[in-house]
Amino acid sequence: MIKHLKDLRQDTVSEFRGGKGELQITHFLEVEKDEFNAKGRLFAKNVLKPGASIGLHEHIGDTETYVILSGEGVVNDNGDAKPVKVGDVIITKNGEKHSIENTGVFDLEFLALILFD
Amino acid sequence: MIKHLKDLRQDTVSEFRGGKGELQITHFLEVEKDEFNAKGRLFAKNVLKPGASIGLHEHIGDTETYVILSGEGVVNDNGDAKPVKVGDVIITKNGEKHSIENTGVFDLEFLALILFD
């Protein structure tokens, strides 16, 4: 089955998890369509404009992986603030925390995959 | 935990699944490092050069999702040959078949996610 970009669910969320500005989410798979085989709940491309962020939050019962596709930012990786750039993979396991902020001048684009524990 | 691009496992496979040329795989998560919570076995970026392909193969016991990042190609989607381009999402469920070929002049880059049934 092929879904085209125009058919993908897109969400825009303000101040997500206490962050700044807007987060744009393009969903590759949808829980509501039973496309995860009950193994996870998010497979998406996220976009943060310059200055926008996802606030610090804890993952309970799942693991989230971010993969930076373009742009520059800072990730709080379970307590440590670290710069991130294209190709970086950030893994936040059950019980760990993360946040991400676009500190660059272009959009910060990154994949997000959440798999259950 | 942050992994940088240079630290990611990269595989180059020739004539994968009976396809043509080389497939380059950059692994975001690794089964061997227990990074899938036993929910899947592949989360990677695949690259096919012009003319290269992954041959037609069946998925048994899992679902694979491709997401086209750049380039142009043709996917055999469980029997139907269809052109694909950036933003297209191809879902191949348990018992279904797919192949993918780079029919363009630039690299065909796509995500691949395999979740167990």
Image (tube, coloured by chain):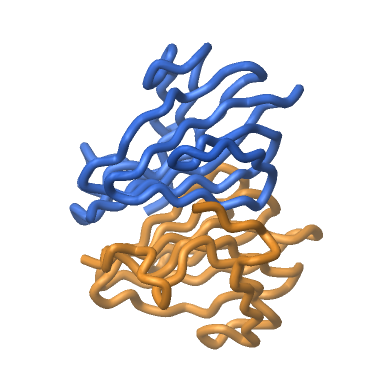
Chain colours: A blue, B orange
Residue drawn at (59%, 72%) of the image: B9
Residue drawn at (49%, 21%) of the image: A23
Q: Is residue A105 left or right of residue A31?
A: right
User: Between B105 and A105, which is closer to the camera in this rendering?
Assistant: A105
Q: Is residue B43 left or right of residue A102?
A: left
The reply to whether residue B93 is in sight is: no
Q: Measured along the vertical axis of the image, is residue B34 above or below residue A74?
A: below
Q: Is residue B60 left or right of residue A2?
A: left
Residue at the front extreme? A79
Q: Name the spot of residue B59 as percent of width and height, x first.
A: 33, 74
Number of numbered tags placed on the structure image: 0
Q: Name the spot of residue B25 as percent of width and height, x first.
A: 60, 71
Q: Name the spot of residue B49 as percent of width and height, x first.
A: 74, 69
Q: Measured along the vertical axis of the image, is residue A20 above or below residue B12?
A: above
Q: Measured along the vertical axis of the image, is residue B17 above or below residue A57?
A: below
Q: Quadrant of residue B4?
A: bottom right
Q: Is residue B14 left or right of residue A22?
A: right
Viewport quadrant of the C terminus of chain B: bottom left
Residue at the right extreme? B105
Q: Quadrant of residue B30?
A: bottom left
User: Between A75 and B89, which is closer to the camera in this rendering?
Assistant: A75
Q: Measured along the vertical axis of the image, is residue A115 above or below residue B9?
A: above
Residue drawn at (42%, 79%) of the image: B57
Residue drawn at (56%, 83%) of the image: B16
User: Between A66 and B114, which is closer to the camera in this rendering?
Assistant: A66
Q: Quadrant of residue B101?
A: bottom right
